Image (cartoon, rainbow, N blue to C red):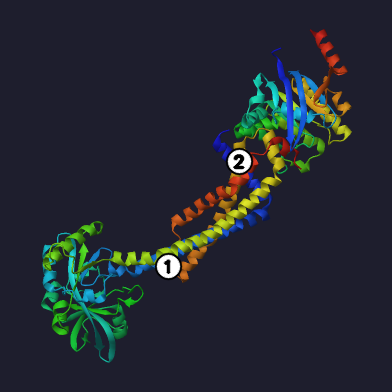
């Protein structure tokens, strides 16, 4: 018999068998329903946590390299990094002049100061000194006003860009552009507001900062500081190449002898990711294993039901064999029945978990059940159906026709 | 002798149950021709069921050879036997052995499914078979909605649908009242007249009388093999006709 026809006929047979005993079929699928629900929800939550993490580090910029004294998540002592030579404006100039594979390069230095506007005071605001290239490097979009120009940044004009938190604290609904605020004891004119950035890892608000030209920053707040040189790669796919170039230029600029290790760090978003991965991968694996346990329990239940079903239908198997069913046909019949039950359970499980994932998305954690989880859920159902059904079906297939016909 | 439909040569069947060895058949030789109507009789434990299972290709002999339509069936494996059963043998059982969850049409369709026929052809043949046993208005009924006689007719339709070489009926009237039993025997008689080869296994003399040849089994051997009066009459009539 044609195998496709056979499979089709067997689906019809299993449909009858499943609907003939609705309560039992329902109870049999329950384990798989719970298993698939928990497995897919677990994956969805993991996906949500991943997304939340990626969002929280998006401000770091996937295509931006940070040349700094420190290495993010470096293994050495803090003092080891601190004792390195500072990264200076000269080195920035040298890098900026020589680099080929960068879209833009900007230096940055920061400190915390108190901000004042009329009677309002904001303490511990991060003040960032940089150049006009900052805007391109970090793709900073303006909510209001504009970023400072090359001329303003080179000339060290007393202008500043504020973050949304500061805008809200100082101006509510008033227009901030053109107003003068005090950073420490020095006056700056506001020329722009950066759109809302959120926070880094949910800890550091990126909207509670003020950006000023780096020359003025050095003049007012001191220039004995180590810079961060921020390089946006020309092509994110060639980030590695850009990194190589940055390292070689920086070694020249800092006169690192051949054979000695770099005395600076080239940091990138990847460092956050790999640290995150190493922290969470074990939890994810254990979570996945625990949820798959319920699936295994479910399939043991199906196997049990299938053994009973085969036993009960011994006579039917005998009849089918007497009128010409081959071993393969009987094997397939029960295998397909078991797969159908599991697939049904999987579908019901998905019908439960997809809405729950939407609820999680709406109220708990921005997430969405990825398509691959749905497909995986269905494939896993089929696999467990085959696993659960194989031995019962094999038992049925190898039954002796004479004995099973006589079975009452 | 080439028109022997069934040719059993020295068939033995031995069951080993624990330490006991049971000789169910002790060398049976039997030839059955096409279009015969034969009854196999014997008390319980005589080996007639074993013989029926072997003739029906449900079981294989321990030794001896069985040729069905010229094919050596005694050396076939399970799946080959399944195919022979599907194509060559139509079973009619004492307990009907219909699939309880399926309606009459589907029960009759089943051998055709295993044969691999397309749906439309299956339905057509199954409907025709049910029509031939007088159940054209009961096709969508399930076995529990049918009387005993009707169930046995469904079983006969199922046995006929693949146009087999043999109809093998095991106590076909055992679960029926006398009148219905008579009707079923009448139906088998008609089928024989249309050219079907029929083998009935029974322990009832009355039923065996319908057949044209009666083979009696006792203790795993053929005790007697005689043409019944009906059979003699039939062959005489044939001779006259010739």
Estimate the x, y position of residue B103 in percent, counting from the top left: 71, 40
What residue would you read off at disc 1? A366
Please state if A53 lies on the left or on the right of A299 as rendered. left
Estimate the x, y position of residue A390 in percent, counting from the top left: 58, 45
The residue at 69%/32% (across/down) is B127
Q: Nearer the viewer, residue B18 or A345?
A: B18
Q: Nearer the viewer, residue A323 or A360?
A: A323
Estimate the x, y position of residue A173 in percent, counting from the top left: 31, 82
Chain bearing mark 1: A
Instruction: Give neighbour class at mark 1: few <14, some 14-19, many 20+ (Cα, 10 Å).
Output: some
Residue B133 appears in the rendering: no
What residue would you read off at disc 2? A331
Answer above or below: position of B103 versus A188.
Answer: above
The residue at 42%/65% (across/down) is A48
Please state if A299 lies on the left or on the right of A126 as rendered. right
Query: Of circles 2 and 1, which is in front?
Result: 2
Please state if A222 lies on the left or on the right of B166 as rendered. left
Estimate the x, y position of residue B115 in percent, counting from the top left: 62, 31
Which quarter of the rendering shows the C terminus of chain B?
top right
Q: Which element type, helix, strand or loop, lies under badge 2?
A: helix
The first of marks 2 and 1 along the sequence is 2
Count every numbered label the image shows and give the total. 2
Chain bearing mark 2: A
Determine the residue located farthest toward the bottom in the rendered image: A119
Q: Which element type, helix, strand or loop, lies under badge 1?
A: loop
Answer above or below: position of A254 versus B181.
Answer: below
Instruction: Give neighbour class at mark 2: few <14, some 14-19, many 20+ (Cα, 10 Å).
Output: many
Q: Nearer the viewer, residue B9 or B213?
A: B9
Where on the picture, by quarter, is residue B38?
Answer: top right
Labelled disc at residue A23: none
């Amino acid at each position: 018999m044609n195998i496709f026809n056979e499979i089709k006929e067997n689906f019809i047979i299993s449909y009858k068998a499943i609907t003939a005993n609705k309560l039992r079929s329902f109870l049999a699928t329950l384990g798989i329903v719970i298993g698939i629900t928990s497995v897919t929800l677990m994956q969805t939550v993991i996906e949500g946590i991943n997304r939340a993490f990626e969002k929280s580090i998006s401000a770091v910029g996937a295509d931006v390299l940070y040349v700094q004294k420190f290495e993010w998540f470096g293994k050495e002592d803090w003092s080891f990094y601190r004792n390195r030579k500072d990264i200076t404006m000269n080195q920035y100039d040298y890098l900026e002049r020589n680099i080929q594979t960068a879209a833009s390069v900007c230096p940055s230095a920061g400190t915390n100061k108190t901000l004042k506007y009329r009677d309002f005071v904001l303490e511990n605001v991060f003040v960032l000194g940089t150049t006009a290239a900052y805007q391109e490097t970090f793709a900073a979009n303006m909510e209001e006003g504009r970023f400072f120009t090359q001329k303003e940044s080179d000339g060290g004009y007393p202008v500043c860009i504020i973050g949304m938190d500061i805008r809200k604290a100082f101006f509510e609904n008033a227009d901030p552009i053109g107003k003068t605020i005090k950073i420490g004891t020095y006056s700056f004119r506001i020329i722009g507001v950066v759109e809302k950035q959120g926070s880094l890892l949910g800890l550091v608000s990126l909207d509670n900062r003020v950006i000023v030209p780096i020359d003025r920053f050095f003049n007012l707040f001191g220039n004995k500081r180590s810079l961060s040189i921020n390089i946006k790669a020309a092509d994110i796919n060639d980030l590695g190449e850009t990194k190589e170039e940055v390292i070689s230029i920086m070694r020249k600029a800092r006169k690192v002898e051949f054979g000695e290790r770099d005395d600076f760090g080239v940091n990138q978003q990847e460092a956050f990711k790999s640290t995150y991965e190493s922290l969470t991968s074990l939890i994810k694996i254990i979570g996945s294993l625990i949820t798959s346990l319920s699936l295994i329990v479910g399939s043991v239940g199906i196997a049990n039901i299938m053994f009973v079903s085969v036993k009960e239908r011994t006579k039917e198997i005998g009849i089918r064999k007497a009128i010409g069913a081959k071993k393969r046909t009987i094997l397939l019949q029960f295998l397909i029945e078991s797969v159908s039950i599991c697939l049904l359970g999987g579908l019901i499980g998905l019908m439960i978990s997809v809405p729950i994932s939407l609820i999680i998305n709406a109220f708990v954690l921005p997430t969405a059940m990825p398509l691959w989880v749905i497909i995986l859920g269905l494939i896993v159902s089929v696999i467990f159906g085959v696993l659960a059904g194989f031995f019962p079906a094999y038992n049925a297939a190898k039954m002796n026709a004479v004995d099973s016909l006589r079975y009452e | 002798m080439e028109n022997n439909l069934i040719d059993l040569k020295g068939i033995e069947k031995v069951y080993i149950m624990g330490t006991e060895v049971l000789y169910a058949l002790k060398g049976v030789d039997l030839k059955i021709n096409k279009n015969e109507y034969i009854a196999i009789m014997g008390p319980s434990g005589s080996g007639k069921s074993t013989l029926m299972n072997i003739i029906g290709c449900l079981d294989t002999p321990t030794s001896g050879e069985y040729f069905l339509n010229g094919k050596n069936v005694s050396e076939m494996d399970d799946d080959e036997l399944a195919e022979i059963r599907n194509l060559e043998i139509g079973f009619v059982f004492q307990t009907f052995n219909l699939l309880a969850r399926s309606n009459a049409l589907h029960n009759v369709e089943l051998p055709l499914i295993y044969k691999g026929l397309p749906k439309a052809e299956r339905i057509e043949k199954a409907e025709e078979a049910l029509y031939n046993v007088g159940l054209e208005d009961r096709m969508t009924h399930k076995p529990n909605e049918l009387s005993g006689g009707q169930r046995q007719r469904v079983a006969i339709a199922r046995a006929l649908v693949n146009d087999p070489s043999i109809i093998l009926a095991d106590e076909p009237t055992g679960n029926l009242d006398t009148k219905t039993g008579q009707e079923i025997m009448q139906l088998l008689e008609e089928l024989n007249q249309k050219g079907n080869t029929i083998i009935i296994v029974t322990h009832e003399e009355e039923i065996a009388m319908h057949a044209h040849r009666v083979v009696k089994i006792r203790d795993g051997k053929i005790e007697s093999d005689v043409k019944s009066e009906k059979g003699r009459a039939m062959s005489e009539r044939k001779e006259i006709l010739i």
